[in-house]
Amino acid sequence: MADKIIRFNGFKQATVSHAAVGVWRHEGNQSHRYNALDYWVETAKTLEAGLFDGLFVADVLGVLDTHGGRIDETLKQGAQTPSIDPLLAVSAMAAVTKHLGFAITVSTTYEQPYLLARKLTSLDHLSGGRIGWNVVTSALESAARNLGYDSQTPHDERYAIAEEFLEVAYKLWEGSWEDDAVVLDRANGVFADPAKVHAIGHKGRYFSVPDAFIAEPSPQRTPLLFQAGSSSIGKDFAAHHAEGIFISVHKPEIARRIVDDIRQRAERFGRDPASVKIFAMATVVTGPDDVSAQALHRALSATVSTEGHLARLSAILQLDLSQLDPDVPLEYVATAGIQGVLEMYTKLDPERRWTPRAIGEFLGIAGGGAEFVGSGNTVADEIEAWVDASGIDGFNITDPMPLRSFADFGTFVLPELRRRGRARTHYEGKTYRESLYGAGQPRLRSDHPGRAFRYSTTGDDA
């Protein structure tokens, strides 16, 4: 384990309050500029300078209105409302970088596979193969209500839709166009050989896509696939399809149980369990020494909104925490929300008494993930220990102070990790997938289920 390279994605949301709800109030905080293009451009440049694998962007499609049945508290703290569509910032970020990947959250419940496949293929072309897709099924009742549904689709059915959605996407990305379909024959007036472009003929329970894909294959064909399913069916879905899996827990021993479970599930699906890269959420507050880092952490913590955290968590759980006694421990109940998060506060950490009040205070600036505070040397020690104990491959690093947190991490922590041989010194290959698997592997691995939909094995690069 000692020579294992630790991988990093920056972790953001195109909103004011992401993991650190309320910290926008800190003097000098730039999160209110989430809707400015230069904010995203500078973020991308900083991450690439630090040799991060990518930028992982969370997203939601509805307002957070579960807490008290109103959006008041989430509006006060800018908690996921307002927000913008992060997909639209990718081209600008790709234009100022050469290696950084972009993993964008898009829901299978409210998109159409034919349209989304073209959007992601377009970005993969325009970025030179640096697009990832965080596949989600969406858990907000408000999203369903405002996108034309009478009520939210039941939890397990959302995953059934996602399974068929990916089947259609694989057929479009992997099977519709052969590798040598584009011939660019000017003499004979043939751009693409019709014999090498195929209709996919899909007719399923949820989607009907009879024709050929409208876009030619991009550098990766299928974008790098991420997922964060935390229920049993969600973990199966992730273990089956995802190349990168995102988890959010605060202890390495809890992470280890999840990691072992996911890798066992991946193996049952016929995949190399080591090929599934697992990233844990983490927040790092660092500086030139422990004292300055701790002082910044205290200052940030003083601005956290406990009530804002509970309003956000209510929406995630689809459980109105305002209606519960703040000092009575939570009990697990089936909800339409993200079940694994509720398990975190009812089953996975029995050492703590998780009342609503305790949860709201605990979420702090880290939002429930790992938290590392100190000098570069101190944080490097803690990161190494966390990785080695948990078995994860890396972290999705939040930025409670946008345009500063990532830069501080690159200035103080990454050089120390590189000195120890634990962080990369250069990028592998040109695509996001090569960043994870090595140069010469821009396409889905041979053991990935999407590869079964390939029409042609010409140029097989597994």
Image: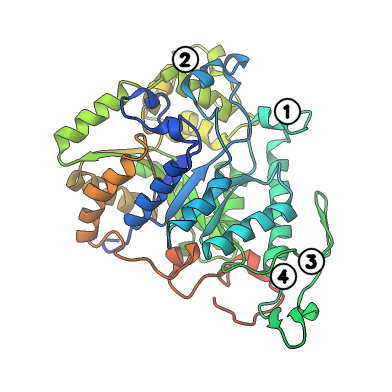
Identity, as a three-letter code, of the amino acid under mark 3: Ala
Query: Could you tell me how far apart the alpha carbons at marks 4 and 3 are, in whole angstroms?
Result: 9 Å
Please tell me how crowded label 1 is: few (under 14), some (14-19), or many (20+) other residues with Cα within 10 Å.
few
Residue 212 is tagged as 3
Q: Of marks 1 and 4, which one's residue comes earlier in the chain? A: 1
Task: Note whether residue 19 is visible.
Answer: no
Q: Which residue is mark 4?
A: 175
Q: Out of 36 and 68, give the one closest to the viewer.
A: 36
**Which element carries disc 4, helix, strand or loop?**
helix
Q: Say whether residue 355 is left or right of residue 424.
A: right
Q: Nearer the viewer, mark 2 or mark 3?
A: 3
Query: Could you tell me how far apart the alpha carbons at marks 2 and 3 are, in whole angstroms?
Result: 56 Å
Asked if residue 426 is positioned above or below residue 307 in the image, the reply reads below
Q: Of marks 3 and 1, which one's residue comes earlier in the chain? A: 1
Q: Nearer the viewer, mark 3 or mark 1?
A: 3
Q: Out of 145 and 166, give the one closest to the viewer.
A: 145
Identity, as a three-letter code, of the amino acid under mark 2: Val
Identity, as a three-letter code, of the amino acid under mark 4: Gly
Quadrant of the snapshot with the N terminus: bottom left
**Which element carries disc 3, helix, strand or loop?**
loop
Q: Out of 389 and 201, give the one closest to the viewer.
A: 201
